[in-house]
Amino acid sequence: MLDVLLTRLKQKHRTMAYPAGPSPELPPRFAGRPVIAAELCSEGCRECAAVCPTAAVQAVAGGVRLDMGRCLFCRACERSCSRQAIAFGKDHRLSAGRREDLIVGAERPAAAPARHALAERLFKRSFKLRQVSAGGCNACEADSNVLGTLAWDMGRFGIQFVASPRHADGLLITGPVTRNMLLALKKTYEAVPSPKVVIAVGACAVSGGCYAGHPEQCDGAAAVLPVDLFIPGCPPHPLTILDGLLRFIGRIPEAAAG
Amino acid sequence: MRGMLSVYNAQAVRISDCPTLSVEAFSEVLVREVPGRSRLVALLAAPWPDGSMHLLAVLAGLADDSLSLLAAPVGSQYSSLTPAVTQAHWFEREIAEVWGIQPLGHPWLKPIRFQASAAGNPGPAIGITDFFSMQGEEVHEVAVGPVHAGVIEPGHFRFQCHGETVHHLEISLGYQHRGVERALRSGPDRRTQHYIETLAGDTSIGHASAWCRAMEQLAGTRVSPRAMAIRGIAAELERLANHIGDLGALAGDVGYLPTLSFCGRIRGDALNMTALICGNRFGRGLLMPGGVAQDIDGELAHTLLGRLDALESDTRGAVELMFRAPSVLSRFEGVGTVSAAAARDIGLVGPAARASGLEIDVRQNFPYGIYRFAYIPVCTGAGGDCFARAHVRWMEVQRSIEFLREQLRQLPGGVLQQPMGNLPPDRLAVSLSEGWRGEIVHVAMTDSRGMYRLYKVIDPSFHNWFGLACALRNQQISDFPLCNKSFNLSYCGHDL
């Protein structure tokens, strides 16, 4: 027993101050929200679109658009651009309530709204989620699960992963929804009592990710269920996921420019 | 081995140089070699340059650490190897499911992934198969999954129980099947690296390492010592993160919460060290054919060394606390035992094999990259139980920390990336790496245009899922979560 207490003392208090205090430091090479400077694009250049593995980058009249929902954050577009018209910034706030708000162009430089009126009213102080992996590679699962560790401690906000869909307020889905998981996912959704919400975490759950177009999967959760919150990334950083969840239930304010 | 083509790890050879026997003679060689003298590293069906299908076997010699290839043309059926060679069991089921080649006399021929065949024939609906079932009064069946209680990937488990005792566990997977191998066959292309890095997303470095070396050997590119060292650092950080996470989760499964809490956080510290190198906690994009995408300069090495010291001290405190607790030891010891003989017969790999006393570790048996110059001792246990699987992880954590410290203190020189040429036609390379779960095997074969004719992936979980089923024999069903965590296998790495 004394052992446990001594070790506990040595391990120190590690729960981060965020969101009341500063957010945890992100690594210098972190790829956050893309920043597009369309004015730097040269007419007719398609380099960035040509190298994108998931067709997330599209050349449009007067510049480029980047769909964060498809993006694997591999930075191939950034490397391909000789004019630095696309860069991945440090902003971790990537989530959006509407799929179309994940598309970044010159006109939307800051985070899109993620707040959900019903979720805020019902789940602000207690939000129980059933996680379903439907073809995920276990990276999104791991970085969702990590929010339960003492460093992130999402239990502080009343957010918790639960074992039974009967105990849940919604689903947090990862993976592109494989054909082989389709029935199990639908049954799990039906087992969640209404009113309920669905959250898609990671490029796969948002758009199929690098498996988009494969006949073995469904190109993401929205093809199967109504999705209320999209959290892009491959995988999203835990801070991106937590930010999305907290804004969704109204625990932290939306970005001013949203 | 006589009559076979001996290769080194990832060596590229002409497909036509691979010795070919009749299926009968091929089978005779395998029956003679496995498991006494060799381990079946891979058994697959592959489209040969002459348009026919061939069986291809990759054997690892147990005495001399040799790697050998042997092939045989095969029609729509052949006589199953499994009755004589247990290690062929899962491989033959896969070959039948993907290529429609029937192993006649296979004792347990069922789908392993419920996937469409290469020819496009849809497989059976998932979960519809001839499950093994035990008969008798008071015998009952417990079915679990695909959706489990935790934040975990999906799979279906059927326990045949009498009272609390599990007499048999059948593991039925395929829920994560997303068509990766099929899609890889049209590469290499823009998506290839992403497919590789998400074969098992918690083993991005392990799989990328096998892929990069296969590509480099095929293209005749040599990477610099510095790139090799950075790859090694990334691989050992991946091992650290996962082993530490597993040790915590094992503590959690026996209700010992302090170590669960501490290790859950420390695992993140290791992931964050990888993120310092490349920006991504799982090392995405760090390895690339020809080298690495990011450098570790003197300042970063210094930072990483400082973090490593803190991580070591925190981990030691958290893990030793657990191993000193009699309540933990009594729950770990003698639970989920796989004997050395069983481990050898079924072809276990990785920490699970080493916990049963088998000295197999790709880093030692078939050294590659930096491991040719920096030696990491193989850590083995003896009991083959949950304790041994936990303790082997703890020993490996310590060895990895020593390796990391040594590498970070004296990073060799060299350019980060060497240019990659095109892949030559009709070549074959078998590339192995030691992921944190064990032996990763990639078999790359090119066609007449230098594109992939076949890209076969064998995640360590492919071998070890059957080991978990064996570990549950005559155990209490309540020990399943603990046994499962002691293996911590990949669903997506198996399902592909």
Image (cartoon, rainbow, N blue to C red):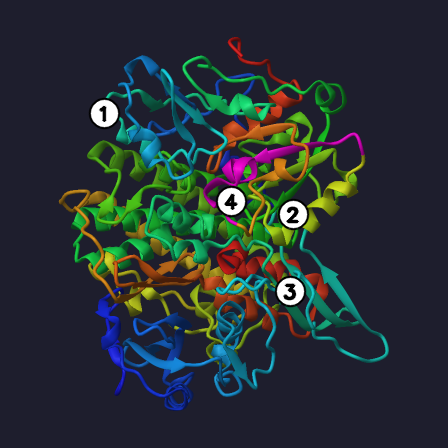
Q: Mark 2 = which residue?
A: B150
How much space separates mark 2 and mark 4, taking CA atoms? 17 Å
Q: Chain letter for mark 3, please.
A: B
Q: Residue A196 in magenta?
A: yes
Q: Quadrant of the N terminus of chain B?
A: bottom left
Q: Nearer the viewer, mark 2 or mark 4?
A: 2
Residue B110 is situated, as x and y percent measured from the top left of the image, at 61, 72
Does dot 3 land on a helix, a strand or a loop? loop
Q: Quadrant of residue B7?
A: bottom left
- In three-dimensional space, the C-alpha distance between marks 4 and 3, rounded to whole angstroms, equals 41 Å
The residue identified by callout 4 is B263
The range drawn in magenta is: A194-214
Q: Which residue is mark 3?
A: B124
Proximity of marks 2 and 3: CB atoms separated by less than 8 Å: no
Disc 4 residue type? Cys
Q: Nearer the viewer, mark 2 or mark 1?
A: 1
Judging by the rendered image, the residue that carries numbered circle 1 is: A82
- Quadrant of the rendered image containing residue A225: top right
Q: Is residue B473 magenta?
A: no
